Amino acid sequence: MVQTEKRITQLFERHDGSEKIMSLFLTAGYPDPEATVDLILGFEENGVDLVELGMPFSDPLADGPTIQYSSNVAIEQGITMKKILNIVEQVREKSDIPIILMGYINPVLRYGAERFCHDAAEAGVDGLIIPDIPIEESGILKGEADKNELPIIYLVAPNTSDERMRKIDEQSQGFVYCVSVTGVTGAREGDEVARSVQRFISRVKQNVTKNPKMVGFGIKSHEDAQRIAADMDGFIVGSALIDTIRDNYPEEGWKDEVFAFVRRLKYGKE
Amino acid sequence: MKYDLPTKEGYYGDFGGKFVPEILIPVLEELEAAYENAWQDENFQQEYRQLLNEYVGRPTKLTYANRLTDHYGKAKIYLKREDLCHTGAHKINNAIGQILLAQRMGKDRIIAETGAGQHGVATATACAKFGVDCIVYMGAEDMERQKLNVERMRLLGTEVRPVTSGSQTLKDATNEAIRDWVTNVEDTFYIIGSVVGPHPYPKMVRNFHRVIGDETRRQLAEDEGRESPDHLLACVGGGSNAIGIFYPFIEDESVQMYGLEAAGLGADTDQTAATLTIGQPGVLHGSMSYLLHNSEGQIQLAHSISAGLDYPGIGPEHSYLHKTNRVHYKAITDDQAMEGVKLLSETEGIIPALETAHAIAYLDELMPTTSKDEIVVLNCSGRGDKDMGTISKHIDH
């Protein structure tokens, strides 16, 4: 078994700050399971540093319409936890890009916390983000995750107090996920994010000192990312990517369109 | 037996907790502090009691059901008349309590979810009474099934937002209400309609409904010279009317309690809402409890003829009371419930809600095992006017 934590640690250690680390969220099994593997492998070639692979859930109450849609498509096409782990295994045959599984706790518990952490580590997963597990409820997964050296990444939000940010930084492993705006996931108009985000970012800088900081929610372009992530280690894009896939799939050459979008996100206009 | 759940962390044994996104944690902490403070505050209690008395119409009667008692010829049957509450069901106890709390917290935008529309109507009513803006999320399919309640809410000045995601029923309306809440955390108060959701909701909603059980104790003492019945029955969807009447009796081990959930077409079919009978523990809408979900942990659609019981989860405290066997939970089919509607209508002149009818239907099984010196109390949680459309489709005259 590969030492899983290392892939994330190495990513941030290697990072010299010259450009922002870019993480993309993709729903596992969307637009279909084979495509998910191809997309992740293609992401790596097009400048993506980290992949958050979404484990679809029937009731994604922290997600906006885009991720609700991709989750539904994946579930309707029969995605299972086994198939999700198989996607990771297939990527691992060809690539060392760090992969984090992200999703709601219920499918994880139904699969079994012990079995899940074991199988995920075995498949080559590098960490977990479970948005409906705040630090208060971390006990439900932490023991098994630790046993398998699987880092759990926690989130901070604009209304998280300074003191609580420090607590979350203490417990988080790999990095801290900074949710830039209140609300559900989804691309937003630039101004909406910019207005309140500066104060939040400066509080994050003050209080999250142990871990690298990645910012997400509402980022849809290179320009958004550069502005919002200026003082962060990197940024996360999800809904805008899925919207791009949705706009192009299954037209001829749809993947090239998606990869072009990914390059623009990372490097700006081509 | 001492009973002092939930714990500080919001747990009832293995069930409960706060399984919510980080954004909601500060909101829940603020809510918990405000609730605990209000609940201890004499002024809050007084205002709440006064509204229950003068506006809701409490205390509701404890009616001796003489002809229903004669029908079985066994224990005496009493009905706790929550159907006589303003708006026709117990739901208003909680809506009034939570809106008072929202006022105290300075939150002037109210949101709620509703399935059958009873909680939506109760919330819309409370908001009209207080002159506060109210948005109710309701599955588009439920809006079609419960047109009358949609019209009631609109007449009360509430905006009813159709939910077209997922199955377009109560669980999806709840998802959508939570999405609104995480987006508008600053000024919005979410009035949850049952003993579900993250801590402190299950505790708070229970305590706003415990007045049902507290009154029952007093009334039974007056009528029968004893505070506790031998058997206590209530229907269970999320479980708010049931916990309201059970809670003050939990420490009273001589009281046998029965929670009647909806079997739909049968607990062994896929058209069911019998969460405790066939479900498995899991996390939905912020708490750990029994759920109807498939082997992948995807939530399954519930079915019941009664829209108020048509929910794939159940309050965490009920999961605990089930697991510890303090309450006996049984599943009642759609057909049995319909027989229950007929029985109470014909014997007592009370047309019960389809939800309530699930508890009535269980009398067929329970009563033969009772004796004449025993007392049965059944929580008559709501009246059946809202269900006349469904009822008339199922009953041949």
Image (cartoon, coloured by chain):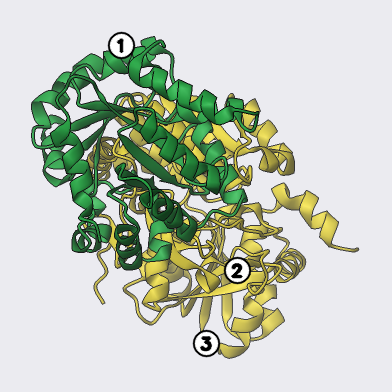
Chain label for disc 3:
B
**Residue carrying label 1:** A195
Q: Nearer the viewer, residue A245 or A145?
A: A245
Between discs 3 and 2, the one toward the N terminus: 2
In the rendered structure, which amino acid carries the disc numbered 2? Ala
State how far apart marks 3 and 2 are (Cα). Answer: 21 Å
**Residue carrying label 2:** B359
Chain label for disc 1:
A
In the rendered structure, which amino acid carries the disc numbered 1? Arg
Residues at marks 3 and 1, common chain? no
Q: Nearer the viewer, residue A259 or B165?
A: A259
Residue A265 drawn at (x, y percent) = 38, 20
Q: Check disc 3: other Cα within 10 Å, few if <14, some if 14-19, many if 20+.
A: few
Residue at 52% from the left image edge and 54% from the top image edge: B60
Q: Is residue B64 above or below residue B76?
A: above
Residue B189 drawn at (x, y percent) = 39, 32
**Farthest residue, direction right:** B397
Residue at 59% from the left image edge and 54% from the top image edge: A78
- Closer to the eye: label 3 or 1: 1
Q: Is residue A37 above or below residue B162?
A: below
Report whether B28 appears left or right of A24: left
Label 1 sits on a secondary structure element that is helix
State how far apart marks 1 and 2 are (Cα). Answer: 54 Å
Residue A150 drawn at (x, y percent) = 23, 54
Q: Quadrant of the N terminus of chain A?
A: bottom left
The green one among the chains is A
Q: Is residue A60 visible?
A: no
Report whether B332 appears left or right of A154: right
**Residue carrying label 3:** B373
Chain B shade? yellow
State how far apart marks 3 and 1 are (Cα). Answer: 71 Å
Chain label for disc 2:
B
